[in-house]
Amino acid sequence: MTFSEFFSDRLRYIIFQAVFVMISALFLLLTGTQTGIVLLLFLIWLLLFLLIQTMDFLRCRAKLLELASILDGLDKKYLFTECIPKGRTIYERKFTELFRQAGMSMIGAVSDAEAAKREYREYVESFVHEIKTPITAANLICRMTDADTRRKLMQELSQIEAQIERVLFYARAEHPEKDFLISQHSLSELVAQAISQHRTLLIQSNVRVETKDLEQMVFTDSKWTVFMLGQLLQNAARYRSTHPVICISARQLKGQVELTVKDNGIGIPSHELSRVFERGFTGSNGRALGGSTGIGLYLCRKISSLLEINLQINSTEDVGTSLTLTFWTRENLTKM
Amino acid sequence: MQKVMIVEDDPVIREELTLLLKNEGYFPLAVTDFTTIKEQATKLKPDLILLDINLPGQDGFSVCASLQMSGGAPIIFVTSRDTALDEIKALSLGADDYITKPYTIPVLLARMKAVLRRSEKKTQTSDILEAKGLTLYLTKGMVSSATKSTVLTRNELQILACLMEHAGEIVSRADLIETLWDRQIYIDDNTLSVNVTRLRTKLADLDLPDLIKTRRGMGYQL
């Protein structure tokens, strides 16, 4: 609060005071008081008035600063109304009380929402675990049918699996802290896991996967990384050209390793490239093909920032898309 | 025959696993009473135990701990719980492997084999395959007939190995591709054709032309 703000706030009061003083002075002059005495009285009044106003201003400013510092120190800003001191004047006290009531109702609503979200997440997690049992059973039963039916059923099942996996990671990405385990892994191992998880889709799409220079160790969480790679492989298989090839290669940098997943698919129009990591963004390719959810890359970006992996995308229409993940090769203690 | 104990509370999976393992040449022991797992294990002396975590009564972790106390068979956890914590807990309790559902059959079988091999501590000398007058040296990457021998590339080696393992049978292209993907060779249909053609040329050099027959619409046959 600046002085001019304070001044303009009190302008009405000050004008009223000035008018009152002028009328008083006029009355005194008319009733025969000497001009000198009136002037003296006026000066005394002016001094006192300025003094009181300045003190008011300073106190008011100190109070606001105190409130600002309380707000600053709070982790959850909406608890502010619980932390402010009771007011000095009756007006301030009433005002604070009203705010406190509003705050209470908000705190209640927030904690209800958080509890509901946690319960929902727990339900989703338990649902995913439960649903895996019948999928496993179905996988085993498939073996009994003839090769053609088996292959078709396996394709459907692997699609179900992929979708369910995404649901699980979507729920987990909200509260990732309880599920991290950063340790050293070999890139070739992680890539092999991701490919094997999605082999049904990749084989069905008649994709050839080339791997190159993957004998490198990186520090990351294996489960989340395999999930991310899986999303990239699924995208590459989905948005493929007629002779799809996915090339997965790694490059050693200083203290880091760059893993590139490159396809020769239909590519992404340049004006859409900046938006592909947005939640729910499907783009012209997704709309043309249908069944796109706009969740895969959104989750990749979220997970990669949690794991402190740098994720970059490059794409040229009709030429292909490449995604680059940059991992740390040594333990980076800040991320734990 | 190696005995594999199946501790799984879902009846469908239990039955299917029993059938699968029987077909694969194991002797499956399906547990249906989950209160006396330890006693059954001591009595039946399995070579391997497949253990689920979510079981009626006690969970798989405590079963695993009590089985380890009695110093029994190697244990593979097969479960739908896939958090890092569960895996660490399982492995720290002395489990030999941890597979999450849904798994594919080849993966399950391969990891069972690996654990069994480790526990038996005997080196398997299955790096030589013989069929139809051919001898394939898997570790050396060579194939030889009675008189000559030649070097194969990784892809050719695995294709031939797969055909020789099923000598006489028709192996469909799809099966062949799936097998190769399991062995981390990620090829497409065209590449398979190219590799088979090259393999035929090499076999012709060994004076064995037409050894790999194309069965139209069905696949290849050695």
Image (cartoon, coloured by chain):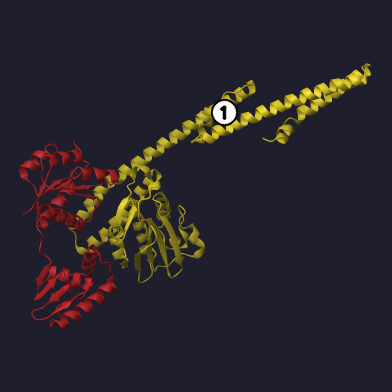
Q: Is residue A60 above or below residue A334?
A: above
Q: Is residue B200 left or right of residue B123?
A: right
The amino acid at mark 1 is: Phe
Question: Chain B: what color?
Answer: red
Q: Is residue A188 above or below residue A14?
A: below
Looking at the image, the residue that sits furthest to the front is A254
Q: Is residue B12 left or right of residue A93?
A: left
Q: Is residue B152 above or below residue A332?
A: below
Residue at image x 28%, y 71%?
B189
Badge 1: residue crowd in 10 Å (few <14, some 14–19, many ≥20): some
Quarter occupied by residue A29: top right
The spot of residue A180 in percent (x, y) is 34, 46
The spot of residue A71 in percent (x, y) is 55, 34
Residue topped by disc 1: A99
Residue at image x 80%, y 28%?
A15
Question: Chain A: what color?
Answer: yellow
